[in-house]
Image (cartoon, helix red, strand yellow):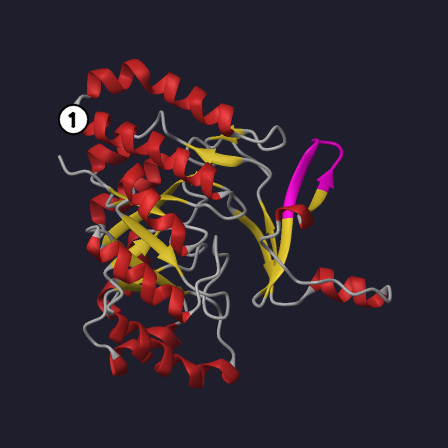
């Protein structure tokens, strides 16, 4: 039985080595001009450093280019893809076919991961993009466990599933909050990673806080809870899911490292010693619950149809 890749989204270059020590085997990085909802901003010099560190430690770097591109950015894609090719990144994450076509022209041997976050809901669609050149499909977060296993059984590509962290509920290409502040005659700095400037939509009836931030790709509203299935990994591991993702968006480096350690232990035991995993998985969940902010409880998302936002 193979162990799935443990894919983590670091906040900065300095996080990569500690995360490898914690058990991560691959990373998603990038800059907001080309990638959506990244845990950290990685400019070109950061990408070069990240690839160097990760490859020396035997891990992989995937760069996100999964934003929606309008005409004014399309001409930039070839030059950026060429940079990623020359930097020896392990894969490019895309959603827009403009990226796929550009990679075919500029870096035909580059591995592609298809990730639109919403439309990967069946194996026909995953295989369609596989036949177009993608080697991996990142499944939508709204799928239940049975659907995920069924997709994997019929997929011609690798399958990636998010197992921990917040998820996106809404995105607008418009700067909704910035426009509102401007309407009020105020200036708002668009900064999505300064914890002291976090903004929330508050649902008084459910007592939920929905994180909201803006970046170059628009306005993003996130889930009030964090997904966590550290105690429910068996079925997906037995099905052969290729990659488990921990999303570190709006999380501290320390939090991401500790979560990675716990999932590393869970994956290893689930594969190597299932009986011990069954004995301690409740304890692993309790450890993760202790790491959580009081306003962000853990749940199993849509894996068992328990969550309704």
Q: Residue furthest right?
A: 185
- Residue at (64, 43) in percent of width and height: 210
Q: Nearer the viewer, residue 194 or 153?
A: 194
Tell me: 100 left or right of 216: left
Q: Is residue 116 visible?
A: yes
Q: Is residue 197 left or right of residue 3?
A: right
Q: From the image, give the main secondary structure of the stretch colored magenta.
A: strand
Q: Position of residue 290 (x, y in %)?
A: 50, 23
Q: Residue 300 versus residue 43: which sits nearer the camera?
A: 43
Q: Quadrant of the N terminus?
A: top left
How packed mark 1 is, by other alpha carbons closer than 10 Å (few <14, some 14-19, many 20 or more), is some
Report the label total: 1
Magenta-colored stretch includes residue 210? yes
Residue placed furthest toward the left: 1
Question: In the drawing, does residue 225 fall left or right of residue 160?
Answer: right
Between 217 and 186, the residue placed more toward the observer is: 186
Region of the chain picked out in magenta, as a range: 202-211
- Compared with 269, 71 (above or below) is below
- Looking at the image, residue 280 lies above or below residue 24: above
Q: Quadrant of residue 24?
A: top left
Whole-percent x, y for residue 22 in the image: 31, 37
Q: Seen in the image, is 41 located left or right of residue 196?
A: left
Q: Secondary structure at mark 1?
A: helix
Q: Position of residue 246 (x, y in %)?
A: 39, 42
Q: Quadrant of the C terminus?
A: top right
Q: Which residue is mark 1?
A: 272
Q: Is residue 81 magenta?
A: no
Q: Quadrant of residue 130?
A: bottom left
Image position, residue 11 (x, y; %): 46, 52
Residue at x 43% of width, y 30% of height: 304
x 33%, y 52%: residue: 27
């Amino acid at each position: 039985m193979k162990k799935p890749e443990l894919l983590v989204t670091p906040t900065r270059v300095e996080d990569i080595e500690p995360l490898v020590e914690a058990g991560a085997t691959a990373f998603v990085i990038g800059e907001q001009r080309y990638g959506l909802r990244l845990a950290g901003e990685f400019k070109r010099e950061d990408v070069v450093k990240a690839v160097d560190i990760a490859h020396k430690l035997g891990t992989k770097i995937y760069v996100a280019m999964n934003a929606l591109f309008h005409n004014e950015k399309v001409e930039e894609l070839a030059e950026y893809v060429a940079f990623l090719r020359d930097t020896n990144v392990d894969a490019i994450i895309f959603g827009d076919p403009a990226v796929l076509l550009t990679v075919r022209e500029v870096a035909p041997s580059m591995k592609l991961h298809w990730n639109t976050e919403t439309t990967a809901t069946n194996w026909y669609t995953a295989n369609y993009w596989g036949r177009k050149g993608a080697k991996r499909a990142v499944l939508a977060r709204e799928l239940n466990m049975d659907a995920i296993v069924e997709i994997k059984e019929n997929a011609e590509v690798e399958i990636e599933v998010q197992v921990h962290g917040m998820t996106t509920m809404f995105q607008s290409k418009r700067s909704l909050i910035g426009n509102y502040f401007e309407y009020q005659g105020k200036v708002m700095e668009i900064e999505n990673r300064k914890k002291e400037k976090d903004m929330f939509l508050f649902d008084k009836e459910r007592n939920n806080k929905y994180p909201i931030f803006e970046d170059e790709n628009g306005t993003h509203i996130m889930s009030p809870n964090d997904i966590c299935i550290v105690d429910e990994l068996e079925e997906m591991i037995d099905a052969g899911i290729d990659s488990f993702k921990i999303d570190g968006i709006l999380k501290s480096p320390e939090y991401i490292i500790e979560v990675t350690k716990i999932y590393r232990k869970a994956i290893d035991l689930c594969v190597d010693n299932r009986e011990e995993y069954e004995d301690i998985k409740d304890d692993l969940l309790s450890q993760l619950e202790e790491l959580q902010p009081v306003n962000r409880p853990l749940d199993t998302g849509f894996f068992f149809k328990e969550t309704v936002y």
